[in-house]
Image (spheres, rainbow, N blue to C red):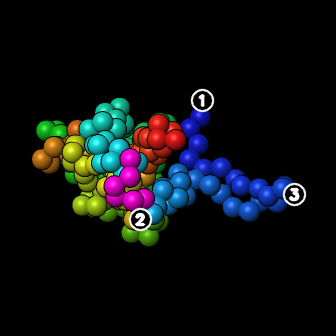
Amino acid sequence: KRRVSGLPVVDATGTFVGRFSERTAIVALDLGTIDDDSAVARQLRKICAADLMSQRGLVLTSKQDVFQSIKLLLKKKVSGASVVDDDGTLRGVFSEKSAMRVFIGLCWEQLPSSDITAWVVRAEERQITEDTRLDEIIDRFHNTHYRRLMVLRGDKLVGEVTRRDALQAALTISREQS
C-alpha cells in the first residue's frame, strides 16, 4: 500500500486544475476561523504531541555516512529523518533537500564532507515537546514548509509528528463533532 501526499484535481471536463496535498489540507484547516469556545477548538486543545507522535520514524545517527543516509531515505520512501547522537540528542534533520545540497556540493565544491552532521538542518520551529497541543501543531504546519515535527523531551528525541498524523487527528475530531 503506497502512501500518497497529494492528488491531482480535475474539473467536470477532466481538465487538470491543480493539486490537493497534505499542505493544502493544513491550509484549509485555517484555525483563525474556528471560534475559541467551540467544541472543535476545545477538542484540538485536548490532544497533545504525545498522543500523536510516532516512534517508528527513520532515525539516523550522527556517525552515519551521508551517502548511506541518502540510500536509506530512498529505500524507506521518506522525505526526511531525524539525526541523533549516540545518547539520543537531536542534532537536526537530514531531508531530501539536504541530500540535494550534498550533490550540489559534490559537483561544485568537491564534497567538503561525507559526515552527515555537516548537512543536517537544526531549526527551532521544527521542534516541539510532548505537551504541544494539536491546535499549535496544525498552526506550525500551516506556517512552515515542514512535513514532520520532532518531539523532544529536553534535548532528546522521543518521536515525531507528521502532517498526516495531525490531519488524521483533526479529521477524527471534526467527524466526532458533526
Q: Which residues are magenta?
A: 34-39
Helix, strand or loop at mark 3: loop
Total labels: the figure holds 3
Determine which residue is flagged by label 3: 13
* Circle nearer the N terminus (1, 3): 1
Residue 159 drawn at (x, y percent): 28, 39
Mark 3: amino acid: Thr
Residue 56 drawn at (x, y percent): 35, 32
Determine which residue is flagged by label 2: 32
Q: Name the residue at 28% across, 61% down.
A: 125
Question: How far is disc 3 from disc 2 in space, using C-alphas?
Answer: 34 Å
Q: Name the residue at 33% across, 48% down.
A: 42
Name the chief secondary structure element in magenta: loop
Q: Residues within 10 Å of mark 1 (few under 14, many from 20)?
A: few
Residue 24, magenta (yes or no): no
* Circle nearer the N terminus (2, 1): 1
